[in-house]
Amino acid sequence: MACPICQKPTDATFRPFCSKRCADIDLAKWFTGGYAIPADDPEDAEELENELQRADLQKPH
């Protein structure tokens, strides 16, 4: 199995990665939204907008 980041052979210690560096690169992609799947469904966008509006109404000012 190859490391999904650099394609080198994996190391059992960091599986499925070859090193801590590649594991950290992958984790950073998760944290920054690099693996996010964009949604084109208009219902999702409308639902999100409604949720944001409700959250704004519930905020104490």
Image (cartoon, helix red, strand yellow):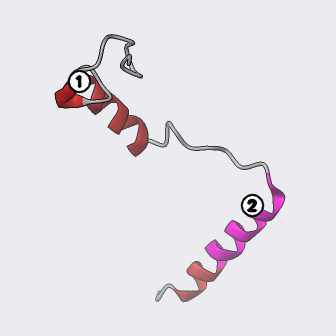
The answer for how far apart the CA atoms under marks 1 and 2 are is 36 Å
Residue span colored magenta: 41-53
The disc label shown at residue 45, or none:
2
Magenta segment includes 47:
yes
Q: Horizontal and vertical percent for residue 28?
A: 35, 36
Q: Is label 1 or label 2 in front?
A: 1
Amino acid type at image mark 1: Arg
As displayed, is residue 45 above or below residue 23? below
Name the outermost residue toward the left: 13
The disc label shown at residue 21, or none:
1
Amino acid type at image mark 2: Ala
Q: Horizontal and vertical percent for residue 29?
A: 41, 35
Q: Tell me, yes or no, whether the two marked residues, 1 and 2, touch with CB atoms within 8 Å.
A: no
Instruction: Please name whichever residue, 54 or 1, is drawn nearer the observer in this view of the structure.
Output: 1
In the structure shown, which secondary structural element does the residue marked by tag 2 occupy?
helix
**Snapshot quadrant of residue 16:** top left
